[in-house]
Amino acid sequence: MSEKARVAIVRKAFPLTTEEVEDMVRQAVGLLGGLEGKIKKGGRVVVKPNLFAPYPPPVSVDRRVIAAVVKLAFEAGAGRVTVLEGVSVGTLMKRVNPERSCCGASRGFGTVEVMRMLGVKQAVEEAGGEVLGVEEAEKVMVDIRGGRALHRVAYPKAVLEADYFINLPAMKTHTMTMVTLSVKNLQGLLDEKGRYYAHRDDLDQHMVDISKIRQPDLVVLDGLIAMEGMGAGEGGSPVEMGLVLAGHDQVALDCVASQCMGIDNPLVVGTTRIANHEGLGCGNPFLIEVAGTPVAEAKKKLTLPVNFTQPLESLVTGVYPNIDLYIGGACPTCWLMTAMAEALLSKAPERFTLIVGVDPKVPPGFAPDPARTFFLGECALATGGDLRELRNEMQLKGLDRFLGGCPPYEQALVKLEDALIAMGHLREDDLVKKALEHREKFFDYYRAHDPTWEPQV
């Protein structure tokens, strides 16, 4: 009989000092047998944390956990440790950057910029390591053997050549994948195009396919402060968990981490179910050995994103009185993007028309105001009949209300915000103010947990 996958759980109550956080990481890795003899003497180690956005935990992995992992790698004999990450697409292209917004809303943060702001760069370098953003990393084209949603991608050469690869995710809920743990964290290794076009109906399969390039040798999960609700960014809420998990099988770790988040059947998580099905690891909790703190003691029932607890259409249809929605055949991702677009439009006093999906059924004599009509997604832009005539009319009038893309992701929301600014319903100052409010919410929360931390903005 094959040996059971082992997942270590270490739990400690708050408040936590830097020394205590490091000790938790050491204990968790120690319960797996430690790193001694597993890292080649003088070899290169690559660590992939989750640094989703320019906010500290729970949005991003705690810098103290990252530094502890870097120290352990050097103690085990590593000659070079590189902390490699690519921030989210939304961070790269949509999030407003207050420091650059002296004359309007400037958007976007680079990965190393986020590392510097959060103190990750300093912590890693003080531990002897180096940081590298995926944007700057040398990449090679890789064919994915057995890929179903992904077949060929640009992938960081450093990961392929690393002697030891450590995945360092956070414990968070996610509006598109229910949770974001080990398997999803590898999404940040792809280039900007690869990350952007992942957010479709095949997102879970896409994530699993990335692991077919190279699986991590070790996973250390930061569950000190988890996120619940509408994560994995500004919409989520922090939850004190006081956990560090570790394992060599990332599917098994995701399985156990999901249980710690209150998900009784971990196979409802798409990435875990698919990865288990394809033999990339063990997603069956009955076949996993848990060392350290039992799941029952570590567990808290976290609130899932609302679109996983109620019908998605309840967030879209019959909600906003100033929006006339015509939605045809549309995938769940477009339904979710519609909810986000409607939330923006609902703040304006005027009435709007929103066209979404394949072949929406509009009434005879359909004649909405072209200036206040938006087409969302590639399917809507490909419709015929009266809608095609409406698009032609809008183009002739120079009205660019076409929010394209498959999916119509961050660039569509940026374009919608720009349109509302041009129409006088939104001000760039409002966007900067909102970005600062999001920032201060997480900054203040994390400062209370780690008084030694100050953002480097």
Image (cartoon, rainbow, N blue to C red):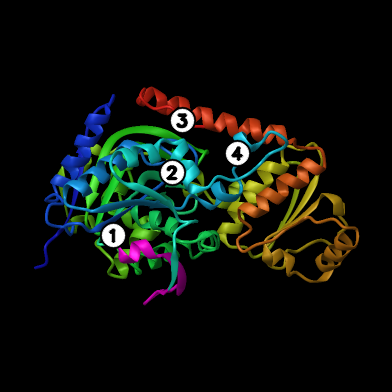
Q: Residue at x 75, y 35 (%)?
A: 427
Earlier-in-chain disc, 4 versus 1 = 4
**Residue 157 on the magenta segment:** yes
Q: Give, as a three-letter code, the residue at label 2.
A: Leu
Residue carrying label 1: 216
Residue carrying label 2: 304
Viewer-closest of 238 and 57: 57
Viewer-closest of 80 and 32: 80
Q: Which mark is residue 97?
A: 4
Q: Are marks 2 and 3 in contact (CB under 8 Å)?
A: no
**Residue 442 on the magenta segment:** no
Query: In this image, 424 relative to 70: left or right?
Result: right
Q: Residue at x 44, y 63 (%)?
A: 138
Query: In this image, 401 relative to 132: left or right?
Result: right
Range drawn in magenta: 142-162
Which element type, helix, strand or loop, lies under badge 4? loop
Q: Give, as a three-letter code, the residue at label 3.
A: Pro
Q: Is any atom of residue 150 visible in this view? A: no
Residue carrying label 3: 455
153 w.r.t. 444: above or below:
below
